[in-house]
Amino acid sequence: MKHFKYSVSFMMVLALVLVFIGCAKPPEAEKSAAKAAMDTAVAAGADKYATTDLKAAKTLWDTSEAQMSAKKYEEAKQGYVSAKAAFEKAAGASAAGKKTMTDEVNAAVASLEEGWKNLEASAKNVEKKMKDQKDAWAADTKTFVDGLKATKDMIATDPAGAKVKSGELKSILDKWDAAFKELATAPAKPEAAKKAAKPAKKEKK
């Protein structure tokens, strides 16, 4: 009789477990909400301006996806809720990160403009020594001027791209700054040696 009671109790517990498992459903609503938050964060530029926060949010998302595959729906549900909050945080951080980068690029552009003025002055000082470098200087001058304008135009909409562009322009600036300093200290080429004077003719005795 006692054995029978244990058997009945075990069957009841097993039935409850099976009912619970059968009632558990994939947290599709939570997953959709988290996915929408992720799309918003990416659209806000979190991949450029809030990379750390976005990475943390994606880790939570990936974990939840793995739990879904393993049919651990309760854990996945909580994970998606956490991922949604993390993606929302990344979206907010993106706005602040974008502003910070915009300020950095504006400062970089101002520095580039000042550096280029000084470089043009240096170019005039060593103009006579440039010779074979004149064509390269002219080409890089056009590249720099056009690039600087493009960088300024990009700042408002794509400060991350503008930052990359400003770095490329800085390399041009540094290259010619070094070249002009080297030319400035290089000795001028000596003039062609004058023809030696002919020895005076000996007088006839």
Image: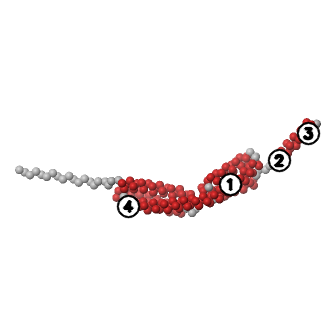
Identity of the residue furthest to the right in this view: 1
Q: Bin the neighbour count of mark 4 within 10 Å (Cα to Cα): few under 14, some 14-19, many 20 and up.
A: few
Q: Is residue 169 left or right of residue 47?
A: left
Q: Which residue is at 38% across, 57% downward? A: 134
Task: Report the Cα–Cα distance between label 2 and label 4.
Answer: 84 Å
- How packed mark 1 is, by other alpha carbons closer than 10 Å (few <14, some 14-19, many 20 or more), is many
**Given the image, on which type of amino acid does mark 2 rest?**
Phe
- First-in-chain label (1 vs 2): 2
Q: Name the mark on residue 20.
A: 2
**Closer to viewer: mark 4 or mark 1:** 1
As drawn, is 77 to the left or to the right of 142?
right
Residue 41 picture location, percent across and down = 65, 57
Q: Which mark is residue 5?
A: 3
**C-alpha separation, residue under disc 1 versus residue under disc 2:** 30 Å
Amino acid type of the residue that numbered disc 1 sits on in the rendered structure: Ala
Q: Tell me, yes or no, whether the two marked residues, 4 and 3, touch with CB atoms within 8 Å.
A: no
* Circle 4 residue: 124
Given the image, on which type of amino acid does mark 4 rest?
Lys
Residue at point 67%, 55% (across, down): 87
Helix, strand or loop at label 1? It is: helix
Q: Identify the residue at horizontal 62%, vertical 58% (top origin).
A: 94
Residue 192 visible in the current orientation = yes
Q: Earlier in the sequence, mark 2 or mark 3?
A: 3
**Judging from the image, what secondary structure is the residue with disc 4 in?**
helix
- Amino acid type, mark 3: Lys
Q: Counting residues from the N terminus, which is met first, the one under dot 1 or under dot 3?
A: 3
At which x and y percent is residue 159? 56, 59
